[in-house]
Image: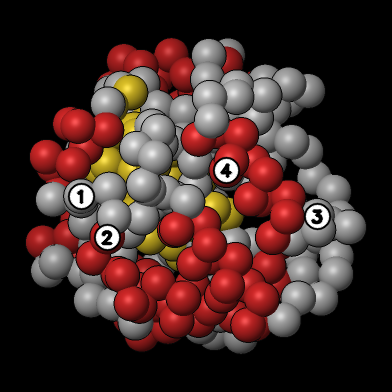
């Protein structure tokens, strides 16, 4: 099974990430990419879906994946480490340059969340991608009480979801979120209410696809029954293979894509 690099761990920041991208584009499989998806897509099919003309990937070697109708590059960029979550302090200008360098290498999938910073990651991603917003896909997340000043408390109440999405849209400088995840399942809010709220946001055009992060098979089924999921994001690595037991079979059955995080482990950059 191909596992794709999502969390690239900014060690040596630009150099590490560029090496991973270059390895991928030249055919190396040592560090396969970010989206483990059940439906691989050739580039020619991808370009036909949204008019993307390979302008940021001159070699044409980047592979693509289909996450429930959302076409993304096989390598994507996770933007949590940029705000120092795993240690270190990084300058805004360097991280914006890194994001744009990833795009130049063919990356079209960028992952962030309101709680990353909080807010900082979304702000940097929004600024970096603004010049070519229509050629990339942005994933963000709700589910913590950031808007209420309680960033460690779970909160997926419908009113909170709407406030969170409006804030993300503003920080990301966009009118839609390509892939919106519930960051963590909130035991105090029925999954059907969460899915129903996101479904309304999708009908309003503010969200195009949605998913869950670190959810059980049962939660996935309940959410999918109300509003079809495009992707589920969970930790997955050689030393952590729990998703293989119940999550993968569920995703295969329902036709939902999988986005692994921390495939190389959790460690500080440097």
> Does 200 sit left or right of 125 as displayed?
left
Q: Earlier in the sequence, mark 1 or mark 2?
A: 1
> Is the C-beta separation of discs 1 and 2 under 8 Å?
no
62 and 146: which is toward the camera: 62
Residue 184 percent location from the top left of the image: 54, 52
Report, in whole angstroms, how far the alpha carbon at label 4 lies from the one at label 2: 18 Å
Mark 2, other Cα within 10 Å: few <14 / some 14–19 / many ≥20:
some
Which residue is rendered at x = 23% and y = 76% of the image? 175
> Is the C-beta separation of discs 4 and 2 under 8 Å?
no
What mark, if any, has residue 21 been given in the picture? Answer: 4
56 and 205: which is toward the camera: 56
What mark, if any, has residue 11 been given in the picture? Answer: 3
Q: Which residue is mark 2?
A: 135
Residue 144 percent location from the top left of the image: 56, 67
Report, in whole angstroms, how far the alpha carbon at label 1 lies from the one at label 4: 19 Å
Residue 64 percent location from the top left of the image: 34, 34
* Element type where label 3 sits in the image: loop
Q: Which residue is mark 1?
A: 53
> Does 73 sit left or right of 270 as displayed?
left
**Position of 137 relative to 167 (above/below):** above
Which residue is rendered at x = 11% and y = 39% of the image? 48
């Amino acid at each position: 099974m191909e596992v794709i690099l999502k969390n690239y761990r900014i060690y040596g920041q630009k150099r590490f990430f560029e090496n991973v991208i270059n390895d991928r584009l030249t055919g190396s499989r040592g560090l396969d990419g970010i989206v483990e998806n059940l439906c691989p897509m050739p580039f020619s099919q991808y370009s036909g879906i949204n008019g993307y003309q390979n302008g940021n990937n001159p070699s044409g070697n980047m592979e693509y994946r289909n996450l429930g109708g959302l076409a993304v590059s096989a390598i994507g960029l996770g933007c949590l480490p940029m705000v120092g979550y795993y240690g270190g302090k990084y300058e805004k200008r360097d991280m914006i340059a890194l994001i744009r360098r990833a795009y130049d290498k063919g990356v079209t999938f960028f992952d962030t969340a309101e709680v990353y910073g909080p807010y900082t990651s979304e702000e940097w991603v929004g600024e970096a991608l603004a010049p070519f917003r229509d050629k990339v896909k942005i994933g963000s997340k709700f589910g913590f009480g950031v808007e209420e000043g309680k960033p460690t408390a779970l909160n997926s109440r419908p009113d909170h979801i709407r406030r969170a999405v409006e804030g993300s849209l503003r920080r990301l400088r966009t009118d839609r979120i390509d892939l919106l995840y519930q960051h963590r399942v909130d035991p105090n809010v029925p999954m059907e209410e969460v899915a129903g709220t996101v479904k309304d946001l999708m009908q309003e055009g503010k969200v195009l696809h949605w998913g869950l992060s670190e959810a059980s098979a049962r939660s996935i089924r309940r959410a999918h029954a109300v509003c079809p999921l495009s992707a589920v994001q969970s930790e997955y690595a050689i030393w952590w293979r729990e998703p293989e037991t119940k999550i993968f079979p569920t995703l295969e059955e329902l036709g939902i894509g999988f986005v692994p995080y921390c495939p190389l482990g959790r460690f500080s950059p440097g």
